[in-house]
Image (cartoon, helix red, strand yellow):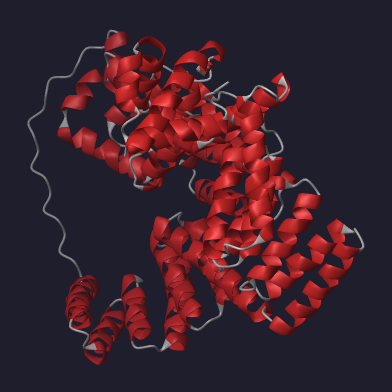
Amino acid sequence: SRSSAHRNNALVRYLLIHLHVLHSKGLLSSDHITMADAAKAQGNAAFSAGRFEEAVQHFSTAIGLDPSNHVLYSNRSAAYASMKKFTEAFEDGKKTTELKPDWAKGYSRLGAALYGLGKLDESIKAYNDGLGIDPANETLKAGLAEVESAMARDSANPLGGMANMFSSPDVWAKIAANPQTRGFLQQPDFVDMMNKLQQNPSSLGQYMGDPRMLQVMGVLLGVNVTTPDKFAEEQGMGKEEPKAKEPEPEPEPMDEDQLATEKAKEDALKEKELGNAAYKKKSFEEAIKHYTAAIALDDTDISFLTNLAAVRMEMGDYDECIKVCDDAVNKGRELRADYKMVAKAMTRKGTALEKKGELEQAIEVYNRALTEHRNPDTLKKLKDCGVRLKKNKEEEYLNPEIADEEKNKGNEFFRSGNFPKAVEHYTEALKRNPMDHKIYSNRAACYMKLAAFNEAKADAEKCIAMDPTFAKGYTRKGGVQYFMKEYNKALETYQEGLKHDPENEELKEGVQRCVDMINKGNRGELSEEEMKARQERAMADPEIQGILSDPVMRQVLADMQEDPKAAQDHMKNPMVMGKIQKLVSAGILQIR
């Protein structure tokens, strides 16, 4: 309409004459708009999705913006460790503990990186340092148990300590750099041998008869290992004339017992396959018959037991499932079976306990499984079970009658001016009945009296979310925003409350207070210190940052200073006009 156009033109003229954009103070620079928290959030999202390289890039960006934030180094250390880049993970873990020596999680990062580098003693020290800060930390306990388990396996294997050298991330680079071993990389059987050794370092003894392995160990240890042929050549000994190749002796035939054992193993595997097929068809009784037959034929393969336990689980026979899992673990210990299989049996037992509702016992078993093998699936089960246990305990604690008693006690302490005690009783009331929105409102009032504005705002927002028609929630939130000098935000909150209760006097008074303060700012009646604080709070508002980072709005602000006609055209757009008014209300733009 003509009247609205007139108002817009008038506002443009005011802005053109008195516009005060904060370029001079550097508050509109990209450094303020691009924030470390945003990069951190992107890194967390990439990490959760398994995109570890991308996560490292985002965390590195965040560190560039906030180099003193220990959490960023911790997160990047985890991403590097997931990429098996343990040297980089160690550097970031070390930096984390230097920046925040009393933060237990930093030591879990450091311990994991040292474990990946094969430095087990140093890893144990890092985990113990963290437990000295937080003795109840489950992550540190699990990590420490895993390293101790690895050390125990190494001590049982005489070559275990030497085998750790093959876990180093620079093994391949060292082999390629040495002229004596470089050619081995062209030999498929050597590459296959190295891959198997890295997957299972304890198998080193199997390959010690290969002269290439002696050469590689010398390179990795930094010593000169001379093979028998090389030694003879260095001593000037002549080589003997090659002898005619003697025929290899025929392998001796297996005796009847060996043949019977091999036949039994083959038959057991066939029974297992039949059991798997029946399991997929949900023919559980048939599956049990085949798995039981496999166990009778060959009791040295605990996978038959873990499969049988899975069937019992599906049938809902959790007690029998637990019994079979225990048999699998005991048999695995007796046979020194692959620790991953033992961990699998433990995890299955934990799942059965969880289905029975025995959550604390399930958590204990999951933790034991993780000491055998740190499996992501087991970690997730442990976390989910912990959340479920916590929720169950909270639900058992619910009692609306006791909640009302605690709320009344809180009201009494509020009236007497003992606000910390009032907060204590309101908090207990919420534990007993977290669905009472009025308790959040009451606690918000206490937090305001204690100048704990962030906590007060959170409680007010929770109150509004639970009952959007409750006017008191808006007066609490608006009051917090007013005291934080966020007059534009407070004004919006009071106006939103009036939509639900148009006659509420507290909300009306709140609107008037905000309008008065915004006008004072525009008239230059606020002190320089008050104005600066108001502007800094506004610049921390994501909505204001979004407006200022919008290329269209940047052009509008520039036109207001340089091209009055273009500025008038911009102001005809209601969306642009609304954003300009938000900047004015926030104190970013001033009209005098």
- Residue 394 x/y as whole percent: 64, 74
- Residue 387 x/y as whole percent: 54, 66
Q: Residue at x 56, y 58 (%)?
A: 498
Q: Would residue 243 appear left or right of 110 to someone viewing this image?
A: left
Toward the viewer: 493 or 274?
493
Toward the viewer: 75 or 470?
470
Total residue callouts: 0
Toward the viewer: 250 or 151?
151
User: In the rendered image of this protein, does residue 136 appear above or below residue 451?
Assistant: below
User: In the rendered image of this protein, does residue 325 appear above or below residue 463?
Assistant: below
Furthest-front residue in this view: 2
- Which quarter of the picture shows residue 368? bottom right
Q: In which quarter of the image is the C terminus?
A: top right
Q: Residue at x 38, y 15 (%)?
A: 558
Q: Would residue 181 appear left or right of 200 to someone viewing this image?
A: left
Toward the viewer: 52 or 570?
570
User: In the rendered image of this protein, does residue 19 appear above or below residue 588?
Assistant: above
Query: Can you see residue 377?
Result: yes
Query: Can you see residue 162?
Result: no
- Residue 34 x/y as whole percent: 45, 27
Furthest-right residue in this view: 416
Q: Quadrant of the N terminus?
A: top left
- Which quarter of the picture shows residue 513? top right
Q: Residue at x 28, y 7 (%)?
A: 236
- Which quarter of the picture shows residue 107? top right
Q: Residue at x 81, y 51 (%)?
A: 449
- Residue 573 x/y as whole percent: 31, 34
